[in-house]
């Protein structure tokens, strides 16, 4: 059975299966969501208005036995940035959808503010069912009810209260292996795009599904083996390696030592208290509480960077607390308590919000005088304001820039309206170069220069040196390709260092598509995806002046290195030109 | 066989050739196996794999020989107490069968300290479940068999994980289940289970006979009762669920 | 003169302590002293090579937040109050 595209118009109760056009056949993941958004969405449209569309697409090899490939991309015009957006998550939802033979779901129509529906997919077809009873409620309870109602072996995508409020900080929550809403395509407000189309959930049951067709099994198997060997050998990705043992939180100490760990709304690059929320500390606590570590976001992941965090008594599992979340909801707000951070993260998951955006929002609100830095109760209180939809809550749910502007703050750490992740660009300039230039808004995963600047993967470059155009460009192009294959970005740690691993990844793709790509094609494919995204943004009104970091980062020195972001504008302009 | 390899010593294997066949014997010579853990189970497992002519043996253990090992860890002698197990075992196995290549790694595998070389098979002869899970995960990712064995008192178990065909260790004993065993046993028990583990490896590599796939062989050596417990895979197993 | 040496992630387990102190005058001296005290760490930090930068791949050594690769390598000088941080290969984000 060849793969199909599912087009859903919720407000008109219309579902169509379409053949995949030829020009989409070799695409998946980000390559496909960006292409469809480019082809079908008017760049100047209001992101929450009737002309926006939301696209789900599993990666090219997702749903096969390729290791660490359970990723799904979600794309649309972003209400947060006003530009094109792709966010991806690791979840068995992705694998189930791919196995059903669905290459993409395009959600259109609306806008609506009530009468939410759920799209139910299985091997017999698709239908829209009423989802109103789950509206206005926390997702932890709701996901549990859904599992009880329609079965445990079903993938779930959903949006929460934040999306129902049309918040620009609203993500799409996918189920983890325990069925909890903890795997997020979080960034860019895609949840609000989904909710305004009238869609609250997607349920995917893959029982009896045909599986992903593989054109050339021999090539695929050869590639799979090469990639698996690379992943099981590299110190960062192997079972028992850094990510498997400590999770992404292992970065807290090293980024703090490197002076690039933003504390108190990007005003200091290190703080001794950071050790209280380190990955080592978290791993110890998890062991003591009998949570889970290592843990996987989806079956067949070799790396296993995930975990299950619980309350102090070992109850109320909530899923993973990523490095970025620990930082955003913690030290960036001068909060150095893992339990408080865990509760804030739980609130974000429960209401369907991106943790990076939420933490930055709380920090700028604190800077704006809404509360004192470090006031844990006040931070939790802000979550209640959102849940109750109070006027303050309605400001906060729209993210960092909106909130900063509302309270007269000038230190607003955003690019293209999207808040920065957990690396200060003044101390680690390659990642700053990526923040500035990616079409996504400040996004570390768009070109993860940290790998080279801090970890020495794929080369060694001094984080304080501003010569990072080439590094950022190469990483952005290769990342766009990885996001298209359906492999997790963390496979890059292995394939950047082990050439056979990268070859293997290309061979897997060739095997599935019956294609003839080589490693040398990767930069061109990546470039073509990013060119398309840039073109969309240009048509939406973006200029090169949008590829800049906020003023304060060029002027305020960041302790301890007391440096500013000094990558010249001309250098930023040539990164993706 | 690649050119330049020494010819098979026919006499050494003359009682085994009728069982594994000439092709099987060549396959063994061309094969590689990792034996992780060189204690009670690893001693017989590595010894029999070496004796059978498995061409490349990788042996891994971070411990040193202790007096209390000598009741069952037949690779070591009293004069070895205090020496690294990996070093002693390498010397002994090499002299035992000079036609094979033995490489030794004297470190623990837990927490990813060891780069496990690529082999055709992993034999998990370790004393803790954390490491067993790690080895299972590597084997599943690489698509190679994992021979699982464990002993406690007068009891032992054995199964072979064939990724994508049988349940994996995580299907049957999820990681989050707390399991600690004391490791009190006799050399006879580790000898039986370790010998079975080697034999499963020999069978798989030479393609002579069906391995213990899809069931757990339970060996009650107190009452000499052996049983097979059918194993079901967990369709949502986070380690191997995507292989089915 | 006192230099603070911090171990992270799996190095902390291997050293058995999170922090130690030394009066070494440069990184080479620091390794000579510290690896003598924490012998279990040696094979994880240094290679056997005789190069002038025998650091294992993926291992990061920072002096006051700067990677020694971008300072003077093993000759990087140390002063009273300096903080040296030693990390195994890490990844994430």
Image: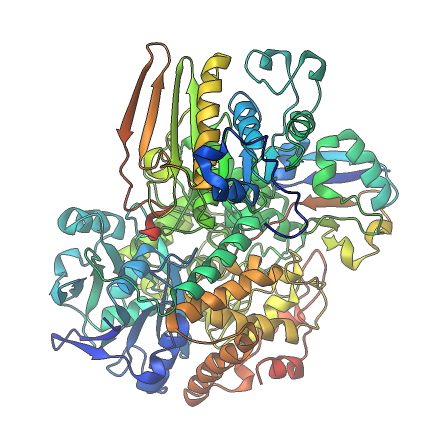
Write down the quadrant of residue A485 in the picture: bottom left
On screen, A16 above or below A72?
below
Q: Looking at the rendering, in which quadrant would you find the N terminus of chain A?
A: bottom left
Do we see residue A159 in this rendering?
A: no
Q: Position of residue A124 (x, y in %)?
A: 13, 64
For the residue pair A533 and A206, the one nearer the viewer reads as A206
Left or right: B147 with respect to B76? left
Q: Position of residue A513 (x, y in %)?
A: 38, 73
For the residue pair A378 and A189, the one nearer the viewer reads as A189
On screen, B188 above or below A158?
above
Q: Looking at the rendering, in which quadrant would you find the C terminus of chain A?
A: bottom right
Left or right: A357 with respect to A447? left
Q: Position of residue B184 (x, y in %)?
A: 48, 13
| Render colour scheme | rainbow
Do we see residue C47 in this rendering?
A: yes
On screen, A524 above or below A194?
below
Residue at 41% x, 86% y: name it.
A540
Residue at 45% x, 71% y: name it.
A405
For the residue pair B12 and A277, the one nearer the viewer reads as B12
Left or right: A389 with respect to B176? left
């Amino acid at each position: 059975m060849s793969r199909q595209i599912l087009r859903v118009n919720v407000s008109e109760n219309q579902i169509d299966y379409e053949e995949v056009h030829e020009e989409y056949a070799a695409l998946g993941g980000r390559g496909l969501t960006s292409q469809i958004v480019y082809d079908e969405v008017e760049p100047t449209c209001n992101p929450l208005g009737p002309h926006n569309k939301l696209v789900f697409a599993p990666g090219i090899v997702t749903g096969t036995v390729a290791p660490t490939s359970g990723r799904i991309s979600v794309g649309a015009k972003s209400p947060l940035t006003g530009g094109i957006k792709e966010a991806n998550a690791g979840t068995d939802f992705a694998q189930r959808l791919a196995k059903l033979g669905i290459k993409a779901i395009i959600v259109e129509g609306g806008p609506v503010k009530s009468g939410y529906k759920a799209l139910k997919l299985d091997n017999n077809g698709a239908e829209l069912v009423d989802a109103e009873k789950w509206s206005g409620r926390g997702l932890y309870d709701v996901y549990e009810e859904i599992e009880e109602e329609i079965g445990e072996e079903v993938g779930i995508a959903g949006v929460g209260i934040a999306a129902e409020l049309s918040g620009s900080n609203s993500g799409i929550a996918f189920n983890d292996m325990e069925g909890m809403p903890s795997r997020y395509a979080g960034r860019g407000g895609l949840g609000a795009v989904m909710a305004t189309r009238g869609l609250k959930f997607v349920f995917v049951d893959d029982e009896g599904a045909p599986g992903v067709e593989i054109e050339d099994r021999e090539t695929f198997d050869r590639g799979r083996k090469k990639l698996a060997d690379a992943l099981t050998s590299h110190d960062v990705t192997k079972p028992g390696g850094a990510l498997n043992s400590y999770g992404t939180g292992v970065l807290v100490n090293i980024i703090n030592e490197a002076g690039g760990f933003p504390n108190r709304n990007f005003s200091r690059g290190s703080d001794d208290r950071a050790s209280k929320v380190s990955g080592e500390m978290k791993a110890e606590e998890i062991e003591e509480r009998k949570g889970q570590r290592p843990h996987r976001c989806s079956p067949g992941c070799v790396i296993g960077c995930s975990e299950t965090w619980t309350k102090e008594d070992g109850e109320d599992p909530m899923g993973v607390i990523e490095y970025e979340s620990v930082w955003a909801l913690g030290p960036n707000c001068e909060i150095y308590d893992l339990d408080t951070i865990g509760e804030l993260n739980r609130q974000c998951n429960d209401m369907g919000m991106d943790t990076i955006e939420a933490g930055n929002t709380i920090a700028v609100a604190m800077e704006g005088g809404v509360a004192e830095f470090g006031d844990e109760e006040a931070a939790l209180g802000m979550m209640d304001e959102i849940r109750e939809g109070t006027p303050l809550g309605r400001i906060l749910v729209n993210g960092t820039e909106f909130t900063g502007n509302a309270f007269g703050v000038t230190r607003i750490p955003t690019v293209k309206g999207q808040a920065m992740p957990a690396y200060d660009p003044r101390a680690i300039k390659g990642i700053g170069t990526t923040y500035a230039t990616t079409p996504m808004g400040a996004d570390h995963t768009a070109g993860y220069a940290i790998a080279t600047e801090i970890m020495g993967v794929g080369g060694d470059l001094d984080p304080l040196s501003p010569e990072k155009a080439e590094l950022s460009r190469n990483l952005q192009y290769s990342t766009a390709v990885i996001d298209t294959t359906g492999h997790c970005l963390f496979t890059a740690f292995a394939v950047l260092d082990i050439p056979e691993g990268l070859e293997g990844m290309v061979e897997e793709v060739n095997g599935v598509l019956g294609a003839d790509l080589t490693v040398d094609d990767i930069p061109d494919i990546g470039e073509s995806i990013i060119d398309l995204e840039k073109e969309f943004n240009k048509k939406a009104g973006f200029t090169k002046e949008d590829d800049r970091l906020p003023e304060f980062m060029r002027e305020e020195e960041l302790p301890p290195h007391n440096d500013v972001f000094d990558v010249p504008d001309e250098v930023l302009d040539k990164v993706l030109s | 066989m690649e050119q330049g390899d020494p010819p098979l010593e026919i006499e050494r294997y003359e009682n085994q050739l009728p069982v594994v066949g000439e092709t099987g014997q060549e396959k063994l010579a061309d094969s590689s196996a990792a034996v992780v853990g060189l204690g009670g189970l690893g001693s017989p497992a590595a010894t029999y794999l070496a004796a059978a002519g498995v061409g490349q043996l990788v042996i891994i253990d971070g411990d040193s020989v202790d007096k209390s090992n000598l009741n069952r860890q037949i690779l070591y002698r009293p004069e070895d107490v205090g020496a690294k197990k990996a070093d002693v075992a390498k010397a002994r196995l090499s002299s035992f069968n000079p036609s094979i290549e033995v490489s030794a790694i004297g470190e623990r595998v837990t927490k990813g300290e060891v780069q496990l070389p690529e082999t055709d098979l992993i034999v998990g002869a370790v004393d803790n479940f954390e490491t067993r899970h790690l080895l299972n995960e590597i084997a599943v990712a690489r698509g190679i068999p994992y021979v699982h064995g464990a002993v406690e008192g007068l009891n032992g178990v054995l199964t072979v994980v064939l990724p994508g065909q049988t349940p994996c260790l995580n299907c049957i004993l999820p990681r989050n289940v707390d399991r600690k065993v004391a490791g009190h046993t006799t050399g006879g028990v580790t000898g039986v289970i370790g010998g079975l583990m080697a034999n499963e490896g020999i069978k798989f590599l030479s393609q002579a006979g069906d391995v213990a796939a899809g069931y757990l062989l339970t060996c009650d050596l107190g009452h000499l009762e052996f049983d097979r417990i059918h194993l079901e895979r967990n369709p949502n197993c986070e380690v191997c669920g995507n292989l089915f | 003169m006192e230099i603070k040496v911090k171990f992270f992630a799996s190095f902390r387990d291997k050293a058995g302590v999170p922090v130690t102190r030394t009066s070494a005058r440069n990184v080479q001296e620091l390794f000579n002293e510290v690896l003598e005290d924490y012998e279990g760490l040696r094979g994880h930090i240094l290679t056997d090579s005789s190069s002038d930068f025998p650091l294992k791949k993926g291992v990061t050594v920072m002096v006051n937040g700067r990677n020694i690769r971008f300072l003077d390598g093993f000759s990087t000088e140390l002063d009273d109050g300096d903080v040296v941080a030693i990390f195994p290969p890490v990844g994430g984000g």
